[in-house]
Amino acid sequence: MNILTGSTDSIKLKKIIHLYPTLIQDADGAATVVRSLIREQIIAGYDVYYGIHKVDDAAELDTLHLRYLDFFLLIQSIFCNKLVSIYGKDFDKRNSIVHIHGLWSVLVLLFAIIFISLRSSVVHSPHGMMSAYSFKYKKYKKLAFHYLFQSWIVKKFTLRVATSEDEKQDIFSNFGVLNIEIIRNGIDLPESSFFRKNKSKILYFGRVHPKKNVHRIIEAWHLIESDFPNLSLSIVGSSDPSYLKFCKDLVRDNNVLRVSFSPSVSYTDRYSVFSNALATILVSENENFGLVVGESLVCGVPVIVGSNLPWSRVAEIGCGFLVASNPVSIAEALRQISLLPSNVASEMGMRGHEWIKTEFAWADVASEYVQVYKRALLNLNKINYE
């Protein structure tokens, strides 16, 4: 239920300030989303900032990260009444939005406190970091941080944005708030075609983390590997060290064949990883969105997706398989897709490509965000100025 109502015709959005710990190219999926959103907002003609830095070209984002120095400069500008020297002479809280991404960052929360104290309109995108599973990982440390520092700050945000109905429910469960919008992520189009024949890999692309159930993928692969000697399993992504060791030990101790582990790749190189994949697999415990599914499909690569994830339409579209997150179910889907004639697999990938290109365009997603920003500004302006 959305409690932000009324006409936004009078709202003139001018400045958008984004906050996330880092946007460097080899950062996580949330950083990928923020970079793409900022790019579209620059194209649309808005004044866009990352922290206190004005961004005129999306290429500038590739190495940016928030610094404590930026925070202290912001504090100094406020006490010296020089906030306009950072955000320009036309800075006005009635037409400027602060968009906070993610959680669990002391620096981001410090920035948030400042903007809340300034009575600015603050929109929050948790990017899956408020899921029940997220709280289980490093449980006591997170619970202490959350309830001592984070929770009361987040409750003061003007509006929250979820990427799926499941994430909306997670946010409601943690904060009991109703002002939650749903906007799914966009998917960037590859700069060149990766539609290739003679695919030789099953691909897992993402963090090697307990949440992702990579060990179950390995166990499923072990069930079918002898039947497909021309295929291999490729695991690509940054790693939780202890879980990576667990997965490698699983491969070694069970003599699992043709499994490779590779580190994460940069944002610009990520689509090339899909080029030799017969299918991409994601069977996480939960995902707020699951960006890799869309990125695989836009490259024409079919997917095998956990039925608990927000990608149930892959079966309807005919561009992949839905599975239970257990080795037997995963292995059956791997077997089915490995037995498909190459032209049939290519047709599946093409259907996925057209679906993502049509329904997940970043320009459309950015337009949805603008309307959400304006509703947030409308709500806060009624409170602050009427």
Image (spheres, grey):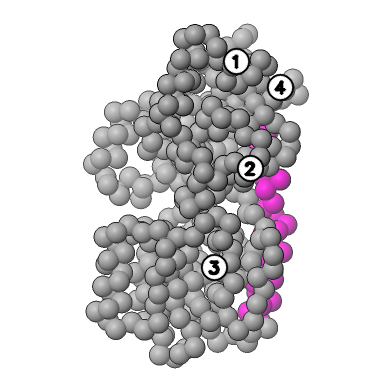
Q: Residue 174: where, in percent of width, then height?
A: 39, 37
Check disc 4 and report the residue beneath it.
11
Which circle's residue, 2 or 3, is located before the other in the chain?
Answer: 2
Bin the neighbour count of mark 4 within 10 Å (Cα to Cα): few under 14, some 14-19, many 20 and up.
some
Q: In the rendered structure, which amino acid carries the disc numbered 3?
A: Val
On screen, residue 223 above or below 285: below
Q: In the rendered structure, which amino acid carries the disc numbered 4?
A: Ile
Bin the neighbour count of mark 2 within 10 Å (Cα to Cα): few under 14, some 14-19, many 20 and up.
some
Q: CA distance from mark 1 to mark 3?
A: 44 Å
Check residue 291 for magenta coloring: no
Q: Residue at x 50, y 46 (%)?
A: 24
Q: Which residues are magenta?
A: 344-370
On the rendered image, what quadrant is the C terminus found in?
A: top right
Which circle's residue, 4 or 1, is located before the other in the chain?
Answer: 4
Q: CA distance from mark 4 to mark 2?
A: 26 Å
Q: CA distance from mark 1 to mark 2?
A: 23 Å
On screen, residue 149 above or below 142: above
**Residue most extreme to the right:** 9
* Label of residue 58 in the image: 2
* Label of residue 273 in the image: 3
* Label of residue 84 in the image: 1
Q: Residue at x 62, y 39 (%)?
A: 38
Which circle's residue, 1 or 3, is located before the other in the chain?
Answer: 1
